[in-house]
């Protein structure tokens, strides 16, 4: 199985190729933190990981992309690239939410012995929230929710929160007398983790669709008043 995975949903841009077969496994990845410029960075990253993996595009079996939540433009970049490459290569498509990918990375980086949350600062006093059991299985989310409301959803055995919104959720929990450990505030979705999830899932989708939990910031301009 040859998988190309792409993520541009938040504050990083990454591409990874996962090759598994005949008892061998190889993972080739590129990742860079960036607030903008994902569209310009993604295709060179793809070319680099494909070259490092010594894989032609015709050899791809599956192309995976994060579907959101995240920035409005960023979410669309990886999805558009995956769709376009799938049309050319006839590879299958796979997608999952950004928070599930972050949860996978968090479990690899930390010793999480109980349920945990992924919380991303969504601005305007809100969080993107996902809840997971100790094995990384999703319990709830992704949600767009205020920190105070999020505390009421947390399982009793949840001890840890990761992501850029972890301090906000830990602070809201402390107000209610509950202690949470806030870890990995710089955590971002990773194409490498996405590739591993795609391989283990064994699932495909016919169409990749973006997951938006809030409307875009941009609004169409009001129609100009006609001159008399």
Image (cartoon, helix red, strand yellow):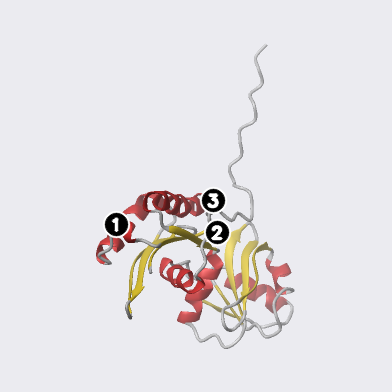
Residue 198 as seen in the image, left or right of residue 219: left
Instruction: Classify mark 2: helix, strand or loop.
Output: loop
- Residue 181: image location, x then y, percent: 59, 82
Question: Which residue is nearer to you in this view: 121 or 137?
Answer: 137
Give the residue at x 42% y 49%.
87
**C-beta proximity under 8 Å, tags 3 and 2:** no
Residue 55, by quadrant, is bottom left
> Is 215 located above or below residue 223 in the figure?
below
- Disc 3: which residue: 72
Residue 50 as seen in the image, left or right of residue 223: left
Instruction: Classify mark 3: helix, strand or loop.
Output: helix
Q: Residues within 10 Å of mark 3 (few under 14, many from 20)?
A: many
Q: Is residue 42 visible?
A: yes
Residue 8 as seen in the image, left or right of residue 211: left
Instruction: Classify mark 1: helix, strand or loop.
Output: helix
- Residue 47: image location, x then y, percent: 29, 57
Q: Residues within 10 Å of mark 2 (few under 14, many from 20)?
A: many
Residue 65 as seen in the image, left or right of residue 129: left
Q: Which mark is residue 47?
A: 1
Q: Is residue 32 visible?
A: no
In primary-sequence order, the first of circles 1 and 3 is 1
- Residue 99: image location, x then y, percent: 55, 67
Q: Which mark is residue 68?
A: 2
Residue 33, by quadrant, is bottom left
Gap between marks 2 and 1, in whole Å? Answer: 23 Å
């Amino acid at each position: 199985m040859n998988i190309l995975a792409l993520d541009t949903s938040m504050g990083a841009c990454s591409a990874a190729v996962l090759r598994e077969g005949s008892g061998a496994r190889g993972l080739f990845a590129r990742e860079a933190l960036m607030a903008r410029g994902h569209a310009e960075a993604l295709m060179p990253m793809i070319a680099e990981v494909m070259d490092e993996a010594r894989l032609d595009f015709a050899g791809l079996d599956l192309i995976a992309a994060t579907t959101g939540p995240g920035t409005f433009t960023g979410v669309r970049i990886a999805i558009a690239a995956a769709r376009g490459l799938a049309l050319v290569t006839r590879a299958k498509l796979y997608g999952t939410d950004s928070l599930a990918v972050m949860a996978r990375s968090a479990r690899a980086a930390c010793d999480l012995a109980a349920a945990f949350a992924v919380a991303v600062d969504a601005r305007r006093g809100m969080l993107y929230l996902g809840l997971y059991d100790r094995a990384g299985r999703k319990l709830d989310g992704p949600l767009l929710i205020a920190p105070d409301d999020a505390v009421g959803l947390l399982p009793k055995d949840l001890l840890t929160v990761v992501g850029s919104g972890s301090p906000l959720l830990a602070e809201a929990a402390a107000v209610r007398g509950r202690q949470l450990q806030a870890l990995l505030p710089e955590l971002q979705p990773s194409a490498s983790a996405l590739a591993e999830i795609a391989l283990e899932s064994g699932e495909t989708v016919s169409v990749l669709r973006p997951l938006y939990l809030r409307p875009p910031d941009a609004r169409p301009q009001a129609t100009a008043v006609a001159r008399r």
